[in-house]
Amino acid sequence: MTLRRPVLLCALVTALAPVGRAAEGEFDRDGSYRTTNFRVFVNDRRLAQEFGDMAERYRREKALDWLGKEMPPWPQRCPLRVEVNLRQSGGATTFTFGADAAGRPGVSSQEMKIWGETRQLLYSVLPHEVTHTVLAHHFGRPVPRWADEGGSVLSENEKECYDHDIKCRELLNQGRGIRLRVLLAMKEYPQDMIVVYAQGYSLAQFLIDRGGRPKFLEFVGQGMRNDGRNWEAAVREVYGFAGVNELEEAWIDSLRAPPSRATGRARADVAMAEKTSRLRSEVRASNPPALPLLEQPVVVRGAAPDRDPPARRAAAAPAAKPVDRPNPPPLPMLLPPEPPKQ
């Protein structure tokens, strides 16, 4: 299962002046590949073009999926740094949120880094990270962790979504789930980060099944009001539940049914992406790692994004001190333990 984490920079900054737009698909002297909204850095010109074109495609598709319309071009291109390796897959998208001249909140700058096996990056990691940008630009401020990660997992390939679905059930049965009244308002990652991905995906899918993505976005927007303390009202007004506890009961009850594979539309999307790719098979892993290295969540205030891949940065940095947080009460077990094998 591939995990990704956006690092949020929440300092108010002065927006940079928009840069001039070159024709889409040009290479710079440093070998980077420029599209309308991205500037791709990778050690291969053909791969740079591949990732740039796919990033633009996902930006358009995910905006249509979530917002019903395309986003206008960004004032500055988003740097997209790609590191191809056969060890682990992951990604991080860094946002700086600020306000424009009229005082409206928004994204002032952003940078995306992805690393791993090429196909995993193109058909799972990249659409996940691009979805982060769609949600960030829609809300103009940091998105609650569960909704940001859960919504972005929906953009991954069929196998990844299925694995998250199964993982959520496993975590609940292990007593590692987070009560929704805690999860909904969570602004930082817990130490058990995988719970946010799996449980966030499961809850997002449950809510979207009940009313579609526009209703889901309305719910998240309402819940974010009053400094993220409006979830009880949002649950009642948007989905008609008596409160968060009733939503939790309905969501858990839905998980008693066996997990199912993604829809035919999702399968068709993956097949089309595979068909349109110009990739060769020179970079491929037969078994991508199921659980990449997890990093401690990081919040940087008032600093520019660094240039080192997170894995390299983590190896050079001292170990992060554990953060004492009260453990929320576990969710009830879904299924009885399996009988011992004879």
Image (tube, rainbow, N blue to C red):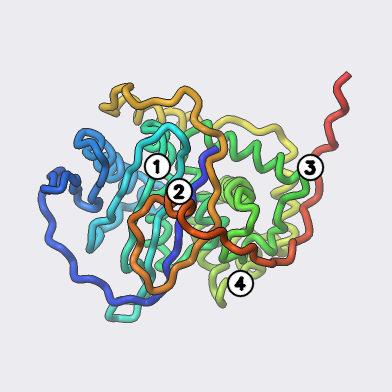
**Tag on residue 311?**
2
Q: Position of residue 122 (x, y in %)?
A: 36, 36
Nearer to us of marks 1 and 3 is 1
Say which amino acid is labelled 3: Leu
Say which amino acid is labelled 2: Ala
Contact (Cβ within 8 Å) of mark 1 with mark 4: no
Compared across the picture, whether 175 is left or right of 54 comes to: right
Nearer to us of marks 1 and 4 is 1
Say which amino acid is labelled 1: Trp
Nearer to us of marks 3 and 4 is 3
* Disc 3 element: loop
**Tag on residue 138?**
none
Contact (Cβ within 8 Å) of mark 3 with mark 4: no
Number of marks in picture: 4
**Tag on residue 230?**
4
Going from N to C along the chain, the mark reached first, 1 or 3, is 1
Q: CA distance from mark 1 to mark 3?
A: 35 Å
From what the image shows, is residue 270 above or below residue 234?
above
